[in-house]
Every structure is written in structure tokens, then in C-alpha cells.
Image (spheres, grey):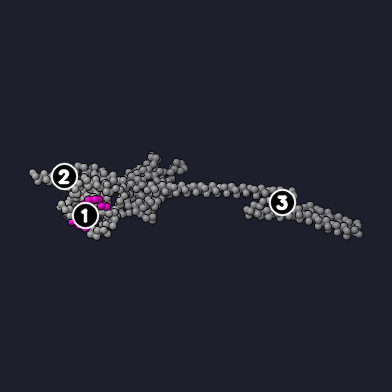
């Protein structure tokens, strides 16, 4: 542009000089000067203005991230500018490619995390475990839906405070459970593990295994405690039954034995009423109580007819009967009761001599081998009934 301006100035000076000395040739010179200026400005349009317009459009496309393929280079300065813009374009292209690769890696990583979380969730559900997580910095605790369901609660029944767990620990288990927890948080144990009873929504207790491990952050300070609880209620009930038979009833006889048996029976099953009977007649149409535990206390023994009772199926059907729910629908006389368990009692000759039974006002949680375990009770009761009959015959003979 500066070259064109200089040429135009020189032409103007030449024309002015010629007009001063040879006015007769001024018209010819002016004509050629005009043509020369037109040629100069045409060249300027092609060699300068056009590349500038192209560079402007190239820069606009760069701003829009369209990244044009090429740009025309003009003179020296314009060529330098064009090369600089081309470098900018190449840099933007490399950045876009790097971002694309990074986005692909992020998507792959997120997909891997989701798949890992899904596998973990499936493993937890398959293992019958419930997740919990305690943020030691904020004090809030996450209890998974499975954690709440184990205690028969809905999603919104339980908050995010640690006391939601602490206050539900059985009084006999609380001190040991919390002492073990403190030891782990202080770094004196590798993991937290505790067998304890937690209070359910209806006030009953469920045995669980609580496990956890602290996660350490900056300065080796624990900032989270993550763990699982596992339902071991069925296993602990079986353990209670076996221990009860081995320790509580091994050296007890007579009325004390029968009372201990029905109380243990009711406690383990968590039912309202439990009793043990002996047949009154050879036809096995009527039975009498040897011990009866109802509403948390022993009540007076009596007799009753078997007709219309689930006990008839046990004694005369010579089989164990378990109704986990809906008892009153099948036996209207037992309205108010929801569940029933009955086990026949037999003597050494395999003759039914009575039965062990219980009635529950709530559905029975049939999560352990009721028939197998309580058959042990019935067998022990059969030995005691036969022993009592033998003693009666000996006393009568004497």
C-alpha cells in the first residue's frame, strides 16, 4: 500500500513539473499518468487488498473454530501474518485432537467405574450385605436401602446421624461394639468387626455382623469409615437353640424341664405363646398341657380338644406343621394368630405321645431350618415324657 502511494505521489509531481515547462504535452502525460495510477491501484487491489480480505476471513473462521485448510500469502508482511495464522490453526487442531482423545479416555474411565460399581452392587446384593458409610469430617452417615430394610424400615424412616445405628444396638452388645469401633478409629486394629443385635422397627432384635474399615487422608488421619452389615439372625438362632438344649436343659427334669423348654422355644422364635402337651387318651383326641408360656410368662396348664386345631394335624397326622402366615384363614378358631409351628413328640417306640407348639401374632420369619432344629426339642421332650411315665409306673407298682 505504501508503494502504491509513493508511485502516485511521483506521478503527481511529474505531471506538475511537465505542466510547468511543456503545457502543450500536459494532456498526453496526464492521460498516461491516469492509466498508470489505474494500473497501480489495480495491482494494489490484487496483491494487497485481496490477501488482506482473505486473511480477515481466515481469522474469522479461526475464531469460529472452523479451522480453514489454507490461506493465500501476499507480500512479506502479509506472508508472515498468514504463516502465523496457519500456526494458530495447526495449534487449535492439535488441541481439538487432544481434547477428543481426553474425552474418549474419560468416557472409557467413567464406563469402567460404572461397570465396577454395578459389579460391586451385584456382589453386595448377592452376599445379602448392606452398605453403610460414615463421613468422619461432616459426621453424616449413609445407610443403604438394604441396611434400612434389614430393620424393617422404609427409606425415609432413618436419618443420616451415627446415632441411628448406635441407639439401635442391644444394651448387652453396645459397650463392646462401640469399644471395638473406637479401637479401629484410633488405628489399633486393621478392621472393625462386631457381632451385635440391632433393634427392628417392631422392637424385636436381629443379629447382624458389622464390618468396616477406615479410609485415611492427608496426614494419615481417617476421614471415612466404610463397611457392610450381614444378616446372621438365622445362624445365631440355631446357635441359641443348640446352646439352650446343651446347657439349659441337659440336667433338668420334670416340670422345670418342660417350663424351660417352652420358654426357650418361644424366645428363639419370638412368638406370643408356646406350650408342650401330652395325649390324654389312646385315641389322641384330647391333650393336656405340661407347660405353657404366654405373653412373656408361664400360665396355668389345662386341657383341650384337638378337633378344629392345627395341633390335630401334628399329632394325628404324625408330622411337623409350619404355617408362616395366614393361620386364621385356615383355622378360624385361632383368630388373632398369624403363624404356627407344631412338632410331634414320640416315645422310644415311635408312638406320638404329645406335641410341642407355638402361636405367633406376626408372620413367622422362616429363615432357618425350623423343623430340623425343633425336632431336637421334641426328641428331648419325648425322652422326658417317657421318663415321667416310667417313674409313675414304678411308684404305682411300689
Helix, strand or loop at label 1? It is: helix
Kindly identify which residue carries mark 1.
312
Q: What is the number of the mark on residue 72?
A: 3
Toward the viewer: 35 or 254? 254
Foreground mark, 3 or 1, reads: 1
Which residue: 24% across, 42% down? 246
Toward the viewer: 249 or 57? 249
> Could you tell me if the residues under marks 2 and 3 are in contact, i.e. CB atoms within 8 Å?
no
Which residue: 27% across, 57% down? 327
Foreground mark, 2 or 3, reads: 2
- Compared across the picture, whether 51 is left or right of 358 comes to right
Which residue: 72% across, 49% down? 79
| Magenta stretch in the rendered image | 305-322
Residue 210 picture location, percent across and down: 36, 45
- Compared across the picture, whether 175 is left or right of 59 comes to left
Residue 265 picture location, percent across and down: 24, 49
Crowding at dot 3, Cα within 10 Å, few <14 / some 14-19 / many 20+, comes out as some
- Quadrant of the rendered image containing residue 323: bottom left
Amino acid at each position: 500500500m505504501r508503494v502504491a502511494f509513493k508511485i502516485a505521489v511521483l506521478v503527481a509531481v511529474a505531471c506538475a513539473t511537465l505542466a510547468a515547462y511543456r503545457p502543450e504535452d500536459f494532456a498526453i502525460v496526464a492521460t498516461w499518468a491516469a492509466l498508470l495510477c489505474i494500473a497501480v491501484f489495480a495491482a494494489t487491489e490484487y496483491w494487497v487488498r485481496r490477501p488482506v480480505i482473505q486473511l480477515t476471513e481466515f481469522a474469522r473462521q479461526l475464531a469460529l473454530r472452523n479451522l480453514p485448510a489454507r490461506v493465500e500469502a501476499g507480500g512479506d508482511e502479509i506472508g508472515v501474518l498468514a504463516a502465523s495464522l496457519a500456526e494458530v490453526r495447526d495449534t487449535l487442531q492439535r488441541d481439538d485432537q487432544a481434547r477428543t482423545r481426553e474425552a474418549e479416555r474419560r468416557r472409557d474411565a467413567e464406563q469402567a467405574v460404572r461397570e465396577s460399581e454395578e459389579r460391586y452392587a451385584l456382589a453386595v446384593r448377592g452376599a445379602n450385605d448392606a452398605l453403610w458409610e460414615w463421613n468422619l469430617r461432616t459426621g453424616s452417615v449413609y445407610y443403604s436401602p438394604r441396611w434400612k430394610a434389614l430393620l424393617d424400615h422404609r427409606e425415609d424412616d432413618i436419618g443420616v446421624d451415627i446415632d441411628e445405628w448406635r441407639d439401635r444396638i442391644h444394651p448387652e452388645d453396645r459397650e463392646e461394639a462401640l469399644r471395638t469401633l473406637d479401637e479401629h478409629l484410633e488405628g489399633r486394629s486393621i478392621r472393625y468387626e462386631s457381632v451385635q443385635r440391632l433393634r427392628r422397627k417392631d422392637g424385636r432384635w436381629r443379629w447382624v455382623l458389622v464390618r468396616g474399615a477406615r479410609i485415611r487422608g492427608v496426614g494419615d488421619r481417617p476421614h471415612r469409615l466404610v463397611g457392610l452389615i450381614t444378616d446372621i439372625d438365622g445362624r445365631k438362632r440355631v446357635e441359641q437353640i443348640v446352646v439352650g438344649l446343651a446347657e439349659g436343659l441337659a440336667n433338668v427334669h420334670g416340670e422345670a424341664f418342660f417350663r424351660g423348654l417352652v420358654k426357650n422355644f418361644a424366645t428363639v422364635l419370638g412368638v406370643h405363646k408356646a406350650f408342650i402337651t401330652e395325649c390324654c387318651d389312646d385315641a389322641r383326641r384330647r391333650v393336656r398341657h405340661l407347660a405353657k408360656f404366654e405373653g412373656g410368662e408361664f400360665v396355668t396348664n389345662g386341657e383341650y380338644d384337638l378337633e378344629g386345631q392345627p395341633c390335630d394335624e401334628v399329632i394325628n397326622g404324625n408330622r411337623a406343621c409350619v404355617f408362616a402366615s395366614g393361620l386364621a384363614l385356615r383355622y378360624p378358631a385361632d383368630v388373632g394368630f398369624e403363624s404356627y409351628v407344631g412338632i410331634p413328640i414320640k416315645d422310644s417306640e415311635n408312638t406320638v405321645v404329645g406335641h410341642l407348639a407355638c402361636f405367633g401374632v406376626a408372620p413367622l420369619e422362616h429363615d432357618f431350618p425350623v423343623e430340623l432344629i425343633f425336632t431336637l426339642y421334641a426328641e428331648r421332650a419325648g425322652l422326658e415324657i417317657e421318663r415321667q411315665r416310667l417313674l409313675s409306673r414304678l411308684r404305682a407298682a411300689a
